[in-house]
Amino acid sequence: MNGVHDMGGMHGLGPIAPDPNEPLFHAPWEARVLALTIAVGAWGRWNIDASRHARERIPGPDYLAMTYYEKWLAGLITLIEESDLMPAPDAPRASPPLTAERVPAALKAGGPTLRQTGAAARFHIGEQVRARNLNPVGHTRLPRYVRGHVGIVERDHGAHVLPDANAHFRGECPERLYGIRFAAAELWGQDTRDSVHLDLWESYLEPA
Amino acid sequence: MTDHDHHHDHGHGQHPPSDMALRVRALESLLIDKGLVDPAALDAIIETYEHQVGPRNGARVVAKAWTDPAYRQRLLADATAAIAELGYGGRQGEHMIAVENTPTVHNLVVCTLCSCYPWSVLGLPPTWYKASPYRSRAVIDPRGVLAEFGLTLGPEVEMRVWDSTAEIRYLVLPERPTGSDGLCEDALAALVTRDSMIGTARLAPVTS
């Protein structure tokens, strides 16, 4: 979706203002939101792509005004509401899948997205490709600022879970993922040797 | 204008609305009541990111790469495996790539679409990394962004910006500071800053 979350290349969003003495959490509730998101996520009722899509569906003006963990809380509530996780009022008490004992192993395992498929790569290292001009209303990881632009394939990452499908519970649909180098001159008309590198799935690309 | 309004208007979120703590507590109580989360698991998750997983992990990787040429080669060839040698990996570090700074190449990591960050080696991201100003401008004006961190690069330095659009996470291998020749690995690790591994800083020369 062409939301405000897709902000690469925008001007005017303010100074960066790094705070060298920033605490890890600004208030205890931020830590609880982080932990709740991970712990409730362990039920497996959704996935990381659906989580990202829940946050990017926050209305644009609100998204820009909210802090990071405010967005996480809003996203978590959306995910719970849209799932069948919440038991009926008279249902017996559930048993959480993520206990304290299982936390180290669960965080250590993470959620790898590399998948084995038999499919041959459509593009090869050194080849010129164009990012397609796709404007889906659902989730995608193809930023607007590269659409229509030409880059060079630099890496072949193998097949990875496709967010565009997984975020909408249409399956993992693993697809080849490539590291693509775009010249800053191509993207922004800048007279430099600088470059911007993105990881893009095969269906985001066409020969150029 | 009330104090609350003042803070909210300024957006990037050091001071969220005071009702956030209450809202989070209400959600946490409901989820615990229903048996959907284990409160001890929440504490264990927070403890992990407060005390175990943070930028000191990445600093150990960098220091080892500086002192062990074979390790540096392994890190640049397969960062996920090389980082796992030191015991780090898992959530938000499942698929890692290390990019090396040199006198003529400077790398910078961003996530324009959300806030993807290599948690396994750097811990949780700072607020500025997650906020709109950095996410929007890092790809179109990386040199202007670095200037806001007090870093000016000459025209002889090529900038490479890595936009984390997939589940590949990037770690910058900073240049070893001048004057650090005699230092052991532990002492070198103590020199490595979080920002140098994101690419928003270079390491200062060591003066003795």
Image: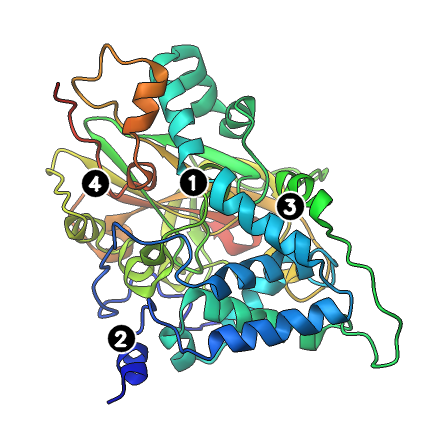
3 vs 2, front mark: 2
Report the chain holding disc 3.
A
Q: Is residue A153 visible?
A: yes
Q: Residue at x 21, y 23 (%)?
A: B177
- Visible residue check, residue A138: no
* Label 3 sits on residue: A111
- Name the residue beneath numbered marker 4: A193
The residue where tag 2 is placed is: B10
- Are the numbered discs 4 and 2 placed on the same chain, yes or no? no
Do the residues under discs 3 and 4 have CB atoms within 8 angstroms? Answer: no
Q: Mark 1 Cα within 10 Å, few/some/many (few <14, many 20+)? A: many
Q: CA distance from mark 3 to mark 1?
A: 17 Å
CB-based contact (under 8 Å), mark 4 and mark 1:
no
Residue at the image position 74 percent from the left and 63 percent from the top: A45
How packed is label 3: few (under 14 Cα within 10 Å), some, or many (20 or more)?
some
Within the image, what quadrant is residue A105 found in? top right
Q: Is residue B70 left or right of residue A122?
A: left
Callout 2: 10 Å neighbours few (<14), some, many (20+)?
few
First along the sequence among labels 3 and 4: 3
Measuring 12% from the left and 21% from the top, which residue is drawn there?
Answer: B207
| Amino acid type, mark 3 | Gly
Amino acid of disc 4: Arg
Q: Chain of mark 4?
A: A
